[in-house]
Amino acid sequence: MSVVTNVMVSADHGDRESVEDFSEWLETNGATHGGGCGSLAEITVLGDNHWGGPKEPECVVWAGALNHAVTRALLDRFAATPWRGPGVVQLMIMEQDRFYFRLWMFQDGELRQITPEGPPVNDDDLLP
């Protein structure tokens, strides 16, 4: 049985090597069974993306659907990754059975969750 965690990373072009290192770590680590949980792929390659609109994206985004990822391990490794432009790096995580991404960014040198943990449990407007 799969347990999917959707992950997206937005970073400056200068941090491509850092994202690739993080992705390589995911391929060999980060899973509940002790092995790899998947990898990230760039989804904003010029001329080869699936975004709507007449223009090319003016950002760099990597994404992956990870299997059996350990979120805490993923966050710890992401925080330990050296970034050239940590102020613009964004990590978005949507775990299995959640209907929203949580956003993580560096503030004052620490990786912090920017968005709330989630909507209130009794939020009638969460799903139709």
Image: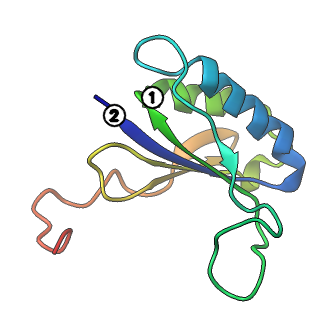
Q: Residue at x 82, y 49 (%)?
A: 85
How far separated are the C-alphas under marks 1 and 2?
8 Å
Residue at disc 1, secondary structure = loop
77 and 25: which is toward the camera: 25
The spot of residue 84 in percent (x, y) is 86, 43
58 vs 122: above or below: below
- Say which amino acid is labelled 2: Val
User: On the rendered structure, is 123 left or right of 106?
Assistant: left
- Say which amino acid is labelled 1: Ala
Q: Residue at x 40, y 27 (%)?
A: 68
User: On the rendered structure, is 102 left or right of 60?
Assistant: left
Outermost residue toward the bottom?
54
Outermost residue toward the front?
48
53 and 20: which is toward the camera: 53
Q: Which residue is mark 1?
A: 69
Give the quarter of the image for residue 33: top left
Q: Residues within 10 Å of mark 2 (few under 14, many from 20)?
A: few
User: On the rendered structure, is 99 left or right of 8?
Assistant: left
Q: Residues within 10 Å of mark 1 (few under 14, many from 20)?
A: many
Q: Are marks 1 and 2 in contact (CB under 8 Å)?
A: yes
Q: Residue at x 31, y 58 (%)?
A: 99
The spot of residue 122 in percent (x, y) is 9, 62
Q: Which residue is mark 2?
A: 3
> Which quarter of the rendered picture does the C terminus lie within?
bottom left
Nearer-N-terminus badge (1/2): 2
> Which quarter of the rendered picture does the N terminus lie within?
top left
Give the quarter of the image for residue 61: bottom right
Q: Is residue 61 visible?
A: yes
